[in-house]
Amino acid sequence: MIKKLLMGNEAIAFGAMRAGVSVVTGYPGTPSTEILETIAKHNDGNIYVEWSVNEKVALEVAAGAAYAGARTMVTMKQVGLNVASDPLMSLNYIGVKGGMVIVVADDPGPISSQTEQDTRHFGKFAKIAVFDPSTPEEAYTMVADAFDYSEKYGRPVIFRPTTRVCHSCATVEIKENIERIAPEGFEKSNRWVIFPKLSYENHIKIEQTLKTMSDDFSEYSRNFITGSGKKGIASSGVSYSYVKDALQNSSAECKLLKVSTTPLPKKLALEFLQELDEVLVVEELDPVVENELIHLCGLHNIKVNIKGKLTGDIKNAGENTVDSVAMAVRKFFVGNSDAASVNTVDPPELPVRPPVLCAGCPHRASFFAVKEATKGLNAVYSGDIGCYTLGNAAPLNMVDTCLCMGAGITVAQGLHRVEPDRINFAFIGDSTFFHTGIPGIINAVYNQTEIIVVILDNSTTAMTGQQPHPGLGKTMMGNISDVISIYDVVSSLKVSKIVRANPFDQDSAKQAVKEVLGIKGVRVILYEAPCIFVSKGKEKYVFNTEKCTGCKVCISKLGCPAIELDGGKAKINTALCTGCGICAPVCKFGAIGKKIER
């Protein structure tokens, strides 16, 4: 067998390809992005892969393919599932013919998300099975299991890796591909049309299926019990790996339950609870397994003391770590003569590195132009999800609100309704515009709302790693498509005025703001300049130390990481400078000039 060193997301991708996936859709979002990208990279031409405009669209495209019998996969992060929740809730009532795996990467911490929501709750809410891998190696093989169970029950399933499973690396044994029969194709039937009577009948079937699944999962090899004793630990996901590490050098007697699925494998859980006095439940995000075990003890009158997040024995926010779990396990065994001897060492504090826009980022130039052009005005600046969320940091201070994808435009409308005399700006990126920005503009035009929408078009989906979007004319299949022009789309929506400008040309960028300020209705400024990872200039800028007075205005106004202090005077770190040039006009003393790099 071939062995490969794979990131968890790569392992999931290879596992899906091994399982015979035919259609893969998704929307980029950390920590899930590399799954779809890996499949696209290693695609032999037999798999259709696309970045969809949003998660709802991605799920619906994959559902259609699954109706026709194909194995399909959808990838997203946990907040992306909120966008896809409408079709997801209905899809379980309809069912699928081909196996359908919805990969939803949860982000404890959160490291790069708005929330720490736990997708296992969504699975319970939607009455859908959830698979919870604990390592990249397990994720590789578990994907095939997820497809099998989906086809066995004719329902979509959720695959829920968390950040450390997604982005950890491990040596994975690559197995032979599973032999697959070609999809039969779509067969016309009333089962695909969601009428109330069908929903009622299918709801009854779903409830029965969940009970059957629970029994089935009690026999599933990824759910198991090891060890013995009066104390037990139940764990799931990557936390199981941490528990194993904590117990490795321990002589304490402990019964260990590994939970890899929901619905909870109840028969296995009841077997685990027998003859135990105490149980510690170790899981990330919410007390899902903990609540299930408490419920089971109540139903069966089992007197076991359950500890975990609800009792404060496991922290209720943030990531679990090897050390935090080791400490909790050690505390669990305190008073026991065979207490686990776990040594923990507090790591040194890392230097604080606040998130910051890159040197040469066009968003800094856009924010600065609007800030300078609106000095003295009573304005509110609503933001959105993307690199430009970092515009909230000093010294720009240009993002007053940020809720979720596309909400900057709609939140600005609500603010206007309460304070009509204030000027409301809404910032949104190009990829987010296609994702959920268009309906917000339509709503503003339809309801005659006074707002100024600033679209920051940097020619990529920058925050998640430069993925293509409809405005670029490229697809994940390597095809060239027609470019969907943001300017043309917005123009067709009958806005009062739309102005285009290059934010690095600060004079025209500021003039664009002034042009729309005196006009009523929905006005749009389209700032167009590529992300530095798409295109870098050949020029760099340097300081003339003789002209520099050390006033620090260049630093206090722009906050560019390429501008540093050296001996009380400013200097440019040429390793970081991209030659955007917005710093030069800021210096009143002419201390900043070009240096041509050849």
Image (tube, rainbow, N blue to C red):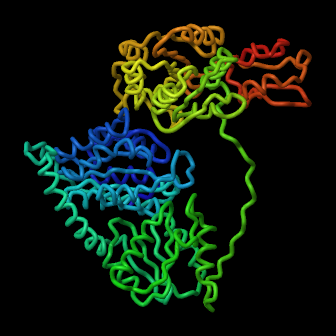
The quadrant the C terminus occupies is top right
Which of the two residues, 568 or 536, is positioned nearer the viewer here?
Answer: 568
How many numbered circles are shown?
A: 0
Is residue 562 toward the left or the right of residue 19 in the image? right
Is residue 27 toward the left or the right of residue 374 in the image? left
Locate residue 591, reporting x and y percent: 84, 15
Residue in the picture at 41% in, 27% down: 440
The quadrant the N terminus occupies is bottom left
Regarding residue 7, the answer to whether it shows in the image is: no
Locate residue 586, reporting x and y percent: 76, 16
Quick check: 549 above or below 196?
Answer: above
Locate residue 68, reporting x and y percent: 16, 44
Locate residue 276, reporting x and y percent: 45, 87
Regarding residue 173, the answer to whether it shows in the image is: yes
State the image quarter where residue 482 is shown.
Answer: top left
Residue in the picture at 33% in, 73% down: 265
